[in-house]
Amino acid sequence: MNGVTAGRSSHPPPEAGAPNGAPLLALRDITKRFPGVLANDRVTLEVRAGEVHALLGENGAGKTTLVNVLYGLYQPDAGEIVVDGRRVRIRSPRDAIACGIGMVPQHFLLVRRHTVAENIALGLPQEGLLRPARRVERRIVEFATRYGLTADPGARIWELSPSEHQRVEILKALIRGARILVLDEPTSVLAPQEVSGLFDVLRRMKGDGHAVIFITHKLDEVGAIADRVTVLRRGRVVATVPAADVDRRALVQMMVGRDVESTLPRARAAAAGEALAAEALEADNDRGAPALRGLTLAVRRGEIVGLAGIAGNGQRELVEVLTGLRRAVRGRVRVLGRDVTNRTAAAICDAGVAHIPEDRVHMGVVATMTVAENLVLRRYRHPPFARGPLLDYDAIMRFAREMIAAYEIATPAATTPVRLLSGGNIQRLILARELAARPGVIIAAHPTSGLDVSATEHIHRLLLRRREEGAGVLLVSEDLDEVLALADRVAVIFRGRIADVLPVGDATPERIGLLMTGQAA
Ligand SMILES: Nc1ncnc2c1ncn2[C@@H]1O[C@H](COP(=O)(O)OP(=O)(O)O)[C@@H](O)[C@H]1O
Ligand SMILES: [Mg+2]
């Protein structure tokens, strides 16, 4: 037997789309507990050959945990997995692959120095790594043609864009014999026009009798690609329904457990005067390679500028330079008319800049300190929290209780250590602390990533309110829907420069998508 087809030949070809046939895959009563969290609570899910089955849920609903159990990365505490009518034990990804299960994880695991063909050969038994056999390359071309997945077998992984990288992961799974392919939030790394390309590939796969489990928290994607959808909430299945039978509103209700307003109330921006300016900024990344290459961008008072772009185009370095965490090699930074280029983070904060950091647990809070202490972290040496050298605990506690109420921070007490709070509540705490000082400039990096719909809605309202009060907001987000919902203008970053800045009314996903991938003039 040719090693390339391992895992495939032992199974009869599935009957494509057989509506009444037995499911290709069944998860029954899967329970998975982490310390303090019931991540999956008796989850039952059946997936048919020839269907795209969406797994929809808010962040933290238990989607990734469930597919990690399926792929053998976690062992369930209870429950069983049935493939093709046979109960299987999946102790590792190797077992999963042998059962015909493939996974495209959210964070790619390919070896960066190797070529596409070498990476794919690595996952196959009996294939040498150093000189991947011609037949691997032939196999790649054959599969790539069949599924519309263009890939150059000789390209090195580090040369690939996120979308090309994803295609290689899909090819790798298919060539290893996957009949059930799991994609965990695959569109989060794609530009809008790349999403339809991915959907074309998935349609070909299902036409071929494959089953696709498509994880998302985006409602529109369910209607665009899924045949059926299973909604998870807090680790439990809410329902499995045909995608054609549910509208957006019904899905939101299932996902969140209540109605959520889809459009935010917003007054017209009355932008005036410069709040923040970056001029011809150049800076290096952690490896010493240029990350910002002459970036120029301005944010006015009373407006939100959304910075859209695919991760890794200089967003992180820009935020760090603007907040005093990274040196600019060239160029200037101005805050409210004052030059703050290469000043310290504390000086930039004092100049009126609030920073909502990307890595909130490591940079936003001191996890071992209490909620109250974290709320005054930036200002405890100043009145009203300090009188001379002494801290005024009553004032600190009063302020903390006010903030907990105003920002709806769910915590047992002001004296609870922050490490016991959920991600959404840590983020509310950071916003409370950063926004209470009424900053003139807010730099928010991925402020809602990993948060559920309610926390996201709350944070959006807070940012809009500060904008109405005259703050200039730079919103860095990989979520284009978020950018389009909040921003007055959309700046697109590509390879360390601003490709263009569009008023939000002109910023269609297609236009932004082209700019994000460097295709528009
Ligand atoms: N390795 C882990 N250790 C502890 N808790 C975890 C781990 N992985 C996930 N969780 C928790 O399990 C719950 C479900 O998480 P996850 O499956 O990642 O959700 P989703 O993919 O739907 O966003 C969350 O509360 C999360 O914090
Ligand atoms: Mg997940």
Image (cartoon, rainbow, N blue to C red):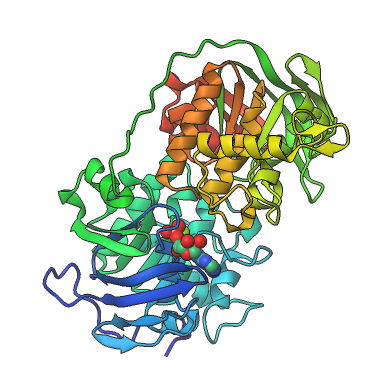
Relative depth, front residue between 154 and 14: 14
Q: Is residue 212 visible?
A: yes
Going 48% across and 79% down the picture, which residue do you hit? 93
Quadrant where the C terminus is found in the figure? top right
Task: Describe residue 136's horizontal placement relative to residue 378 as left or right.
Answer: left
**Residue 271, horizontal then vertical, whole percent:** 56, 11
Q: What is the quadrant of residue 130 in the picture?
A: bottom right
Q: Position of residue 28 (x, y in %)?
A: 28, 77
Is residue 175 in view from this perspective?
Answer: no
Q: Position of residue 492 (x, y in %)?
A: 57, 30
* Residue 12, position as x, y percentages in the image: 25, 84
What residue occupies the far right of the structure in this picture?
389
> In the rendered image of this protein, does residue 326 appear above or below residue 80?
above
* Most foreground residue, 99 or 229: 229
Residue under the image location 20 percent in, 69 percent down: 16
For image coordinates 55% across by 76% down, the residue present is 121
Frontmost residue, 2 versus 504 = 504
Tell me: residue 392, above or below residue 170: above
- In the picture, the quarter occupied by the N terminus is bottom left
